Amino acid sequence: RGDSRSADSTVDSVCPYCGVGCQLRYHIKDDEILFVEGRDGPSNHNRLCVKGRFGFDYPRHSSRLTVPLIRREGAPKGVDPDFDPAQPWSHFREATWEEALDRAAQGLVSLKNAHGPNALAGFGSAKCSNEEAWLFQKLVRTGFGSNHVDHCTRLCHASSVAALMECIGSGAVTASFMQAQQADVVILTGCNPAINHPVAATFFKQAAKQGTKLIVLDPRGQAMGAHAYRTLRFTPGSDVSLFNAMLNVIVTEELYDQAYIDAHTEGFEALKAHVWDMTPEIMADSCGVSADAIREVARLYATADNAMIFWGMGISQHTHGTDNARCLISLALACGHTGRPGTGLHPLRGQNNVQGASDAGLIPMVMPDYQPVSDAQVRSAFEELWNTPLDDKPGLTVVEIMEAVRDGTIKGMYIQGENPAMSDPDLDHARAALGTLEHLVVQDLFVTETAQFADIVLPASAWPEKDGTVTNTNRQVQLGRQAMPLPGQAKPDWWIIQEIAKRFGLPWDYSHPRDVFAEMKRGMPSLDHITWERLEREGSVTYPCLSDDGPGEDVVFSETFPTTTGRAKFSPTLPLPPDEPIDAEYPTVLTTGRQLEHWHTGSMTRRARVLDDLEPEAVASLAPGELRRLDMQPGDPISITTRRGNITLKTRVDTGMPEGMVFVPFCYAEAAVNLLTNPALDPYGKIPEFKYAACRVDKAEAT
Ligand code: SF4
């Protein structure tokens, strides 16, 4: 705890970091969070990881933005390594809320008037509440007048959602991760839960202890491997080959569940024919694992009474990310492993509210609850709800919006709580695009790298400073409560969005997030039987919920799927190489991701003292053999170069890394790995290939 004072009050809330959604209790003294404890929530049972326990001093960091800012005339836009977010006065001046909001809205309105609705776009945030996500997409759709609204789901699980929507008609998980404890076999693939979903990982470990066979399929060795019954470390980028080979075993050895297939699916005969020749023996070489090992894991999964598949961004962040997810869905459908306790498909969601923000409509092609914008009936229902005509064309996605900024089509943006100047691929291009915007409004806690391009910066709210609901990876809608006052002139995000909306002439009059939640229920059938009052009383309700007092459905789709036919669909896939294969000039695979202690672009966790002390600087992880090949020691500096740029950082030895691969976390602005990543997109989910870029690793001079 590091503080001998005793708390004078407690507030119950939810962790603001990952999609596990651990419930916690803040202990407060003099409006400060003294320490945090886990509560007995449905996804954490009193547990917390290091971020949830120690990551709460960021709201009071010395660089916290507490006043509205307006860019000084002529101040340069761009990421300046010498810029001090705590002293932004060389680039910005302080403004009143009235002036900042007027300038923010006027800039956007005049661009719309001059160039039409397609000149504007907005990025909302998966770190904000459901109510704030709802308001943000409503502002873009009814104020800006287009569907150019997206958020970071585009960079994490958009391909998973595309495959799930296509094959089973729903983008959310079919069962909570707690169901792993009732499974006989659990596949973890392309995920690293001990790092990225640490409390979920504890339940996987517990399941393994109680006899569940964990199968870890991943190019990198990882902590879960110590608890695994089998681990297959396959060649990076060969996922589709591996999964098709597993399907081949299930088909040719007739391990599939014909009764389930007949009752619940369509397209199995086509899938059977499609995978017939993709034998493990043929695929083994490209996968870098033996045919026997592929046969064994396919048999284990198929013959289990109950089995689940969990996946992460190692699956989704590829140009074949949607194909990867389609394969995993085919595996589950072929074996009848959905719709019962201990079975299911579960893409482990990353940010605390990426599920809720997606449900609430921060997606360019769908309205809230994934209702297509192109469907006239859907549009008409929302037009009636909002009393405004809506655009019928799907909007642009995150990377497409940056392209449209670059080519001059989009001239003004409103970015709330996202940091594309750190999180987009091929950052030089993304940053150059941000620099060309005629008007950029950024709403955040700090003057982030993206805010360094802004014309107006609006000081927003940290999670412990406001009320709101969030939805975790398990579809559990949970209530977060305000525990501390907003600093200086900072305001809740929902209030700021409403003020911008009013300046677009929209007649909004919400006085609290519960008013917004009440409106959401009118457009989102998924919230049936879930009320603000229930959440205040019970803390968490799972959707779908079938009654006013039931806890909600932990496992869904036992009878039918929400598709037009009521059946799930097999979607055959062909192996495709990565967009940028390694070659003689760039012989090493660069992959990126998170660290246990740091969260995404680091804007919060690098300002949390304990977390930053634990992981204070950028490091590149390499296999011991790779370091030997470079004649280097751990801690020596290396330079990593791709066709898009170069960074220099220290090395760390990691016995889990395969040779020929380097891993770099993406939270360090001083060695921003997204300067190097490949912007090539999956054609369906429009997600960039963060998990595979060809690079060259060289010794660097010590600085
Ligand atoms: Fe927070 Fe996720 Fe850690 Fe739970 S596992 S404490 S939700 S970061």
Image (cartoon, helix red, strand yellow):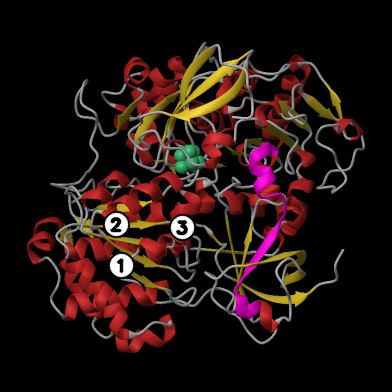
Q: Quadrant where the N terminus lies?
A: top right
Q: Residue 458 location in percent, x, y?
A: 71, 26
Q: Residue 198 location in percent, x, y?
A: 45, 47
Instruction: Please state which amino acid type lies under the numbered disc 2.
Output: Ala
* Magenta stretch, residue numbers: 607-626
Q: Which residue is mark 1?
A: 229
Q: CA distance from mark 3 to mark 2?
A: 16 Å
Instruction: Please state which amino acid type lies under the numbered disc 3.
Output: Asn
- The local crowd at label 3, few if under 14, some if 14 to 19, many if 20 or more residues have their Cα within 10 Å, is many
Q: Residue 634 location in percent, x, y?
A: 70, 69
Which residue: 35% across, 85% down?
Answer: 290
625 is within the stretch colored magenta: yes
Which residue: 50% across, 31% down?
Answer: 133
Secondary structure at badge 2 equals helix
Q: Which residue is mark 2?
A: 208
Image quadrant of residue 302?
bottom left
Image: 511 above or below 697: above
Q: Is residue 432 left or right of residue 291?
A: right
Q: Nearer the viewer, residue 168 or 346?
A: 346
